[in-house]
Image (cartoon, coloured by chain):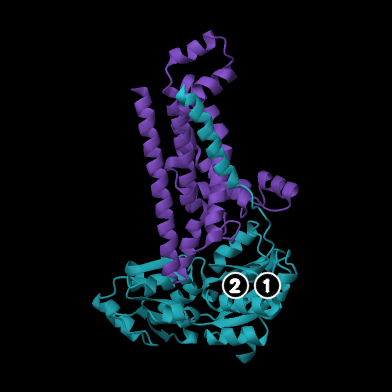
Chain colours: A cyan, B purple
Amino acid sequence: MQTNRSMPVLLARFAALVLGALPAMAQDDRPVVAAASDLHFAVAEIAEAFSVETSMQVRLIFGSTGNFSRQIREGAPFEMYMAADESFVAGLHAEGLTRDEGDLYALGRVVLVAPNGSSLTPDESLDNLAQMLAEGTITRFAIANPDHAPYGMRAMESLITKGIWDDLQPVMVLGENVSQAAQFALSGNAEGGIIAYSLALAPEASTRGTYALIPEDWHEPLRQRMVLMNGAGEVAEAFYAYMQEPTAREIMERYGFVLPENE
Amino acid sequence: MDWTALWLSMRLAGWTVAVLLPVAVLMGRFLAYRSFGGKGLVEALVMLPLVLPPTVFGFYLLVAFGRNSPVGGLWQNLFGHQLVFSFEGLVVASVIFNLPFAIQPAQRGFEAIPAEVREAASCCGMSPLASLWKVELPLAWPGLMTAMVLTFAHTLGEFGIVLMVGGSIPGETRTIAIAIYDRVQAFDGQAAAIMSAVLVAISLFTIALTYWLSARMGRRLS
């Protein structure tokens, strides 16, 4: 019987294929650093310099500050947490999940961006945005989700200060974090958005549009704090220290961050 | 191209298939041959992941396996790390989420075996195990293969659950689907395009394989 022979052979082949995929469970002990999305390009560059200089490596993951703090509460195995807003670090510290209260590492800024070819021309006062909104020419406008992303909260506050938050609601699209908001805002599918200055300055984004800095007194400050978690090892400690050294500080400044001592 | 992520997805799919193969054989066979009160309910439960949003499922998993849950606590004590945000956690999620893709085609495969064939096997003095190995599996294998191939392909495409319980850790929970999402957010359209094309190719291949298998199964029955 032909099937009787071919079936076990095929099943065995398939099992071999599947089992072949099983090994290689080698433990990766490079520490995981959870960093706010506005750091996407800046901290990636710093981690690169860190590994060249020290031949130690970290695994970077980027996302919304609020999501990371939720995941840390749920037991995520991060060794270092770089928040876009210090209140999230304070919350985790109060629950005893962090080593200490951490350090302020940067002050962030928000910018109004418009992609190339958009009818919106970014200006610091947001006048052009308000005018176009009144004329009904804004069809989509992107910010990060203000429920859990600090840059979304600051964008919301800026728009409230300008008095156009309510009018923008019908055209608002929310990114899960600020780099998704930047992707929405600069993809050409929206007239613009409010994103992190550091993302607007990144080469990957700066060629796609124009920006204008929003006055810093229009919103609460973006006091960005980092902290080591309880389980942090030596490599994470070294990276934490490296963040405060000249190389890292120079990179952070290049991405538009104001550094704590230079306030 | 994030090879680590592709390899991780392959491993996740491999583990899911390995765990689900015996489950598919036992459950598929059971559901195909037996009728009992509440069978409809069991079949509905098996099919539930097909219609349930992954976010609902991800939410329940976080509740059930999180740090403060009994299962999560037991896992932490046994293995020294959390079940959520780990590769093992993804395997658990993936196994449950793929139940319909594994059991349903297996059940169809067993159902396609005429009752007389099984009766003949037992009349010939074959034990149930011998009957399963020598008669039923050879006849039901297109269904089982379809089940395994579908499970493998579906695992590669999983996104919502992984996003909720994974945490996108490179080499542990950053699957290829999550890597594409990350690359798009980083304005790295080129990497996203390459990885997407690879996934399209793999998916197309597996779907073609399942069609070919079911055509074979159809021919055998006619």
Chain of the residue on which disc 1 is drawn: A
Q: Quadrant of the C terminus of chain B?
A: top left
Q: Secondary structure at mark 1?
A: strand
Judge by depth and name the residue closer to the eye, A235 or B221.
B221
Q: Residue at x 52, y 76 (%)?
A: A41
The residue type indicated by label 2 comes to: Ala
Q: Secondary structure at mark 2?
A: loop
Q: Where residue A259 appears, x then y in whole percent?
A: 60, 86
Q: Residues within 10 Å of mark 2 (few under 14, many from 20)?
A: many
Q: Residue furthest top?
A: B123
Residue A18 location, quadrant = top right
Judge by depth and name the residue closer to the eye, A158 or A227.
A227
Judge by depth and name the residue closer to the eye, B182 or A50.
A50
Residue A238 location, quadrant = bottom right
Q: Where residue A115 appears, x then y in whole percent?
A: 35, 78
**B190 above or below A16?**
below
Closer to the N terminus: mark 1 or mark 2? 2
Q: Residue at x 49, y 36 (%)?
A: B102
**A163 above or below A250?**
above
Q: Where residue B48 appears, x then y in whole percent?
A: 46, 38
Q: Where residue B43 appears, x then y in whole percent?
A: 46, 30
Chain of the residue on which disc 2 is drawn: A
Q: CA distance from mark 1 to mark 2?
A: 8 Å
Q: Residue at x 68, y 78 (%)?
A: A103
**Residue picked out by circle 1:** A227
**Residue picked out by circle 2:** A83
Q: Are marks 1 and 2 on the same chain?
A: yes
Residue A145 seen in the current view: no
Residue contact at pointers 1 and 2, CB within 8 angstroms: yes
Judge by depth and name the residue closer to the eye, B220 or A178.
B220
Tell me if B83 is positioned left or right of B141 in this view.
Answer: right
The residue type indicated by label 1 comes to: Val
